[in-house]
Image (cartoon, rainbow, N blue to C red):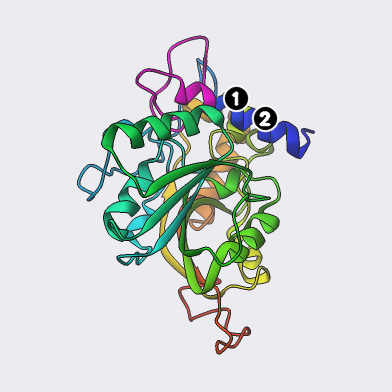
Amino acid sequence: METAEQLKEIVRQKYSAVAEQPDADSCCGPRLDGPTSCCGPSNEVPINMAVGYENVNGYVADADLGLGCGLPTEFAQIKPGNVVVDLGSGAGNDCFVARAETGETGRVIGLDMTPAMIDRARKNTKTRGFTNVEFVYGDIEDMPLPENLADVVVSNCVMNLVPDKQKAFTETYRILKPGGHFSISDIVLKGDLPAGVLKDAELYAGCVSGAIHKEAYLQMVQEAGFTNITLQKEREITLPDELLKNYLKADEIANYRDQDKGHPAGGIYSVTVYAEKPTAATPATAACCGPTCCN
């Protein structure tokens, strides 16, 4: 079994390969040229989880590598003048969208652990002359950022790749101002995912096997101290048979499909989760808001 550091290095290498492509594509979208794709062998069928940004204010096509699984800025309630931190910022796509919301008086900080992504994001920033967007190299489990910094934290299909997710949410809590909030799009599981998929480290870098069950994910958010935890969006991700056959036998695929039929809620889902860091006046026990959250 891979260690946490080995898994991080796998992710770093795979996303470096994406960043260094002249016309980089997602490891969750179109396949890269060459003997291997970002998600594994070239005979593997990619999983397309990306959401289109084309009509979003602030969208920069050069910064969109198709690596996301949602559109967290759509739900992030960013206001003019806000300080926004994007965790796992890649080439800067969500940072530039956030900048359009926070305006010239705001500040946007992208954090990423892949140097090639930081370089690409900084080039995109320089090309457009943005002076209030910056990119910082660092680990989400140990962010090189001060506490009480951000009004809003966003992240797009990144937390599932972090080995110690509880520590990552604790760090997110630390860098948020009291009364601040996050909106995070991510991949979670319902029911059982085949072991052959879960154990594959290449697919881990492709946004699936690093995911955990939805209930455990929301529990980590609550245990980090967040309140008003709300599920803003949820959609199912379908794994094609062409991909599953690289990991499972025919009867195992059939059993997986039968599970889906018998348990429609089971499978892989893209979710966007909202939560707040309480102020001194906010009861810390107000973790869940109603039937649409923590379930």
Q: Nearer the viewer, residue 6 or 201?
A: 6
Quadrant in the picture for the C terminus: bottom right
Q: Amino acid at mark 2?
A: Glu
Q: Which residues are magenta?
A: 15-37
SS under mark 1: helix
Left-right relation of 200 to 292: right
Q: Do the numbered discs 2 and 1 sit on residues whose CB atoms are within 8 Å?
A: yes
Q: Is residue 2 visible?
A: yes
* Residue 35 located within the stretch drawn in magenta: yes
**Disc 2 target residue:** 9
Q: CA distance from mark 2 to mark 1?
A: 6 Å
SS under mark 2: helix
Where residue 79 appears, as percent x and y from the top left, is 32, 67
Q: Is residue 139 above or below residue 115?
A: below
Q: Is residue 200 visible?
A: no
Picture residue at 47% right of the left edge, 10% below the top: 34
Q: Residues within 10 Å of mark 1 (few under 14, many from 20)?
A: some
Quadrant in the picture for the N terminus: top right
Q: How many marks?
A: 2
Picture residue at 36% right of the left edge, 52% below the top: 71
Q: Nearer the viewer, residue 59 or 235?
A: 59
Picture residue at 38% right of the left edge, 35% below the top: 66
Q: Nearer the viewer, residue 169 or 270?
A: 169
Q: Is residue 183 above or below residue 285?
A: above
For residue 13, the mark is: 1
Q: Amino acid at mark 1?
A: Gln
Q: Residue 178 appears in which quarter of the rendering? A: bottom right
Looking at the image, the residue that sits furthest to the left is 55
Q: Residue 285 appears in which quarter of the rendering? A: bottom right
Where residue 148 appears, as percent x and y from the top left, is 56, 67
* Residue 284 located within the stretch drawn in magenta: no
